[in-house]
Image (spheres, coloured by chain):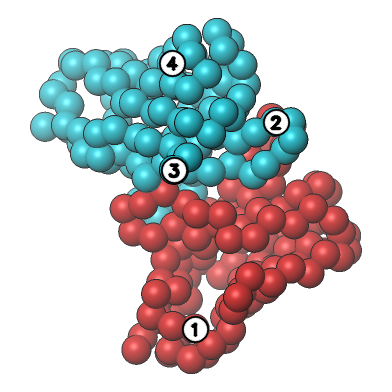
Amino acid sequence: GQQLNQSPQSMFIQEGEDVSMNCTSSSIFNTWLWYKQDPGEGPVLLIALYKAGELTSNGRLTAQFGITRKDSFLNISASIPSDVGIYFCSHLESEKLVFGKGTKLTVNP
Amino acid sequence: DGGITQSPKYLFRKEGQNVTLSCEQNLNHDAMYWYRQDPGQGLRLIYYSQIVNDFQKGDIAEGYSVSREKKESFPLTVTSAQKNPTAFYLCASYSLLPYQPQHFGDGTRLSIL
């Protein structure tokens, strides 16, 4: 299957800072999904993107579906301690959901 | 409330033993999936099913088996053939028509005694 390249692998930030992470693929796709996983829990869907160029917000989170359909980014503004976790990008490839390896976010109070 | 329930939360296996992880959903979703997650890694697909009584192998199916006798249930058996079963197992489901993104259960952590 296709690989999703997610970066950075990890981030250490101070509370209040903005965060940006992205995902790229060698192929084009019709969906981009962003999930967050808290330690010991299942991933929770944050934002779903279905159209090239689409920019969607969910509270302090903003995600965009790249124009080329090969990339997506997720921004978190004014980070807080509960933003800690692993963020995964994913897309639907045929019947399968393919995931990046995740960006581990640590927020220092 | 509708959702996906995985049980147990923690499971221990002895060498040579088969264990079964439960996944139940009341979302009326057609498709159900099993993933394996190792520390610092992403999610790898074990098996998936898009319709009752039918399922397909994912990328790492060796040493695992599944059944889909009911729409709501998709149990995963970790067999003794799986030599490195210690991992976090996640079940997910989604609606094909209309399409709705995958939702996950809270996971089962399997450890070897």
Q: Amino acid at mark 2?
A: Leu
> What element does badge 4 sit on?
strand
Identity of the residue drawn at 50% across and 54% down: A44
> What element does badge 1 sit on?
loop
- Which chain is rendered cyan in the image? B
Per the model, the C-alpha gap separating discs 1 and 4 is 41 Å
From this view, report whether residue B13 is shown above or below residue A49: above
Q: Amino acid at mark 1?
A: Ser
**Residue picked out by circle 3:** B1
From this view, report whether residue A17 is shown above or below residue A19: below
> What element does badge 3 sit on?
loop
**The label number, if any, that marks residue A79 in the structure image:** 1
**The label number, if any, that marks residue B96 in the structure image:** 2
**Residue picked out by circle 4:** B66
Q: Earlier in the sequence, mark 2 or mark 4?
A: 4
Q: Residue lying farthest front?
A: B1
Judge the density around disc 3: few (<14), some (14-19), many (≥20) Cα neighbours within 10 Å.
few
Question: In front: mark 3 or mark 2?
Answer: 3
